[in-house]
Amino acid sequence: MKPFAELVDFRLPPPLEQEVHGTTVLAVRYDAGVIVIADRRATAGNLIMFDQAEKIMALDDSTVIAISGAFARSVEICRFLGHSFKYYRRMALAEMSREGKLAEISKALADNAPMAMQGFGVFLPIVAAYDHKTDDFGLYFFDGAGARFQNKEYACAGSGSERIRGVFEYLSRSRGAWATRPFEEVLHDGLEMLDIAADLDSATGGFNKVMPIVRVLDREGSRVLDDSTLKKVVKQVLR
């Protein structure tokens, strides 16, 4: 069976002179799944290009990816990965394994590395994935060459992530492991960390004008969090 990339002759688009970048994304465990959160600001240099960027995508029912870095390049790669998973499912009449999906993501990053080393198309995702066979949630982050790292509790990426990385550990030690805590508490803490990142990183958008994106991955699949619940918690965080 030919690889999907070879079948469709997938090539990365040429780099832009001034690329649009996305910033802070994070994923945290809760007692029944994973919450993935992202701001919506996209920047080019010191300019805010737009504030409606969609930085979280569902690659399939059990895999959610959040993107930081060159926005146009990362969206193109994520769309390719989603179609690649679908192609495998239809050709093999079976779901690709979680390890296979992660390998595909690593390969896409490795293929993008030459451009990234030249300063174009830097793309660093985080991935939340559920394995139906083992009933296990995994959180993964990557470097620009495609190397994969796993954390059982949380993952973050983007320019604002360095400002909040230590907060994850503090909250874990002071309030208990993320994976043991209820949805409402974890959602509040996740949004609070994104708000801190927005205060300390000019490239991360806040909540005052545009709601962040929140997607939930659990044993039933993934879904975008409804506006009423999101607005309620955002109001609590801002207050």
Image: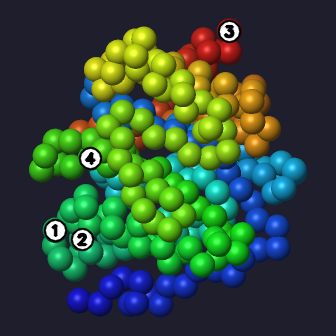
The numbered mark, 4 or 1, whose residue comes first in the sequence reads 1
Give the CA separation, mark 1 to mark 3.
48 Å
The image shows residue 231, relative to residue 102, as above or below, that is: above
Circles 1 and 3: CB atoms closer than 8 Å:
no
Q: Quadrant of the C terminus?
A: top right
From the viewer's perspective, tell me whether residue 149 is left or right of residue 208.
Answer: left
Circles 1 and 2: CB atoms closer than 8 Å:
yes
| 2 vs 3, front mark | 3
Element carrying mark 2: helix
The numbered mark, 4 or 2, whose residue comes first in the sequence reads 2
**Residue that numbered label 4 is attached to:** 130
Residue 212 appears in view: yes
**Residue that numbered label 3 is attached to:** 239
Among all residues in the image, which is located at the extreme left?
133
Residue 39 appears in view: no
The numbered mark, 2 or 3, whose residue comes first in the sequence reads 2
Residue 166 % position (x, y): 54, 28
**Residue that numbered label 2 is attached to:** 89
From the viewer's perspective, tell me whether residue 175 is left or right of residue 170.
Answer: left
The type of residue carrying mark 2 is Arg
The image shows residue 143, relative to residue 216, as above or below, that is: below
Element carrying mark 1: loop
Residue lying at 72% horizontally and 69% vertically, measured from the top left: 119
**Residue that numbered label 1 is attached to:** 94
